[in-house]
Image: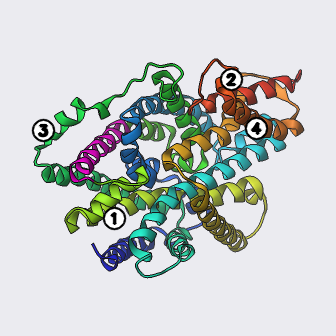
Amino acid sequence: MSPTLIAIIVAVYFCLLLFITYLTSRDATSQTFYLGNKRSPWYVVAFGMIGASLSGVTFMSVPGDVMNKQFTYMMMVFGFLAGYAVIATVLMPLYYRLNLTSIYSYLEERFGRSTYKTGASFFLLSRVIGASLRMFIVVNVLQIFVFDAWNIPFFVTIIIFIASILIYTFKGGIRTIIWTDTLQTTFMLLAVVLSIVFISKELQLSFGGIITKVFQSEYSQMLVTDWSSKQFFLKQFLSGMFIAITMTGLDQEMMQKNLSCRSLKDAQKNMFSFSIVLVFVNMMFLILGAILIFYANSRGINVANTDDLFPTIAIHHMAPIAGIIFIIGLISAAYPSADGALTSLTTSFCIDILGLNKFTFSEDKKTKIRYLVHLSFALILMLSIFIIRSINDEAIIQTLYKIAGYTYGPLLGLYSFGMFTKWQVKDRWIPLVAIASPLLCYVLSVYSTTLFWGYKFGFELIIMNGALTFLGLFLLRIKKI
């Protein structure tokens, strides 16, 4: 499959996104950018959120990681389901009752300005790192299979990718993203299904035959009962539950889409339907991973990094149509997480840090400030992707959840204390608590086998982080109710 053909596919796909942008961004205002004027159909949001939740990381890293972790990831997915139920029944009613544009405004009402700024700052940090990791995996594939052949440097590839996202999110914001996510989710799911079909044919197995082969193999193992293992099933389930609560329920990007629904009832319909479908979609990715391993073993294919398994097979070892489907699926998985991240970062910084909604500026001046913030975060993401390329050496999905344990943990502690206690706190000291908790978690993680009789922390570190933040707030409580 030639680099030129790949580039043409990406260009055609991008033109389709621009057409949708044109239709959805006409007469756009700041309210359109932030909340889509609260007119988004819940079923469209639900379908589009599948793509936003999965991203290019799931598309490449989850299938490849089956080689090392088998199907143990499914225990996290079941945990996601429980976490989404908490979001729909506990967090969403709170957000809608307070009529929030930024979900971190709740922290100001509950505790004070310092806590509010702390929560928003941790979201900005979390989302910049998370979005950069998600974008890196896609940009890296484009670099290896397209731009290296043309001797184009990596930093130029980053600029092209980020610029393309800027173009179609600059004006329409969340209203545009709701509809582009729907298109991209459709292509991504089609790519997964068709990839399974094509590889099954290459292995000369029927669909039923390949499914039987997958679940009779060692790769279908879901339960690890060794309590000291990072893949211990209870750790995986609880990690998944709290990762869903924090990375979706306490994340401005994901909640911004839910808050654009017409009502709380519609937003809850969206969350419940989306979460159930997501279980089956993740299972498809794991099945695809096992099939890719069967194919690699039968052809003697070896890869240095498990993230490279899917693109290597699709582009170098199968018919061109398989490579085309992979590229369409990859960019369809990449853009929903990238565009949503850029929009939510802009929203949070404008509302939470600058307080733009509290000033009586003209609409034109607010728009100019928003454009400047939008462009600034695009530059920050470019720099972050370049740094990640030079330091990361493991499967991206492992890195993503590991970092989330440190950056989202303080948000978990802040919201838990705010919602489940009636105490006030010494607001000015909260930033120190939020910084100290991840640092202490890092120390505990490094020395866990020595301190806890061989126990190794996995993704459940996010629970420890949230608990330490909660404890810090408890120690800073004051008598005022």
Name the side, left or right, on which 21 lies relative to 460: left
SS for tag 2?
helix
Q: CA distance from mark 2 to mark 1?
A: 45 Å
Magenta residues, start to end: 275-300
Please say whether residue 243 is one of the residues in the magenta stretch. no
Q: Main secondary structure of the magenta part?
A: helix
SS for tag 4?
helix
Q: CA distance from mark 1 to mark 4?
A: 39 Å
Which is more N-terminal, label 4 or label 2? 4
Q: CA distance from mark 2 to mark 3?
A: 47 Å
Which is more N-terminal, label 3 or label 2? 3
Crowding near pointer 2: few (<14 within 10 Å), some, many (20+)?
Answer: few
Amino acid type at circle 3 is Gly
Q: Specify the label residue 439 is tagged with.
A: 4
Q: Are marks 2 and 4 in contact (CB under 8 Å)?
A: no
Q: Which residue is mark 3?
A: 209
Name the side, left or right, on which 67 lies relative to 340: left
Q: Depth-wise, is mark 1 or mark 4 nearer the camera?
A: 4
Q: Are marks 2 and 1 in contact (CB under 8 Å)?
A: no
Amino acid type at circle 1 is Ile
In front of the other: 290 or 76? 290
Q: Which residue is mark 2?
A: 450
SS for tag 3?
helix
Q: Are marks 3 and 4 in contact (CB under 8 Å)?
A: no
Which is more N-terminal, label 1 or label 2? 1
Q: Residue at x 10, y 48 (%)?
A: 204
The colour scheme is rainbow
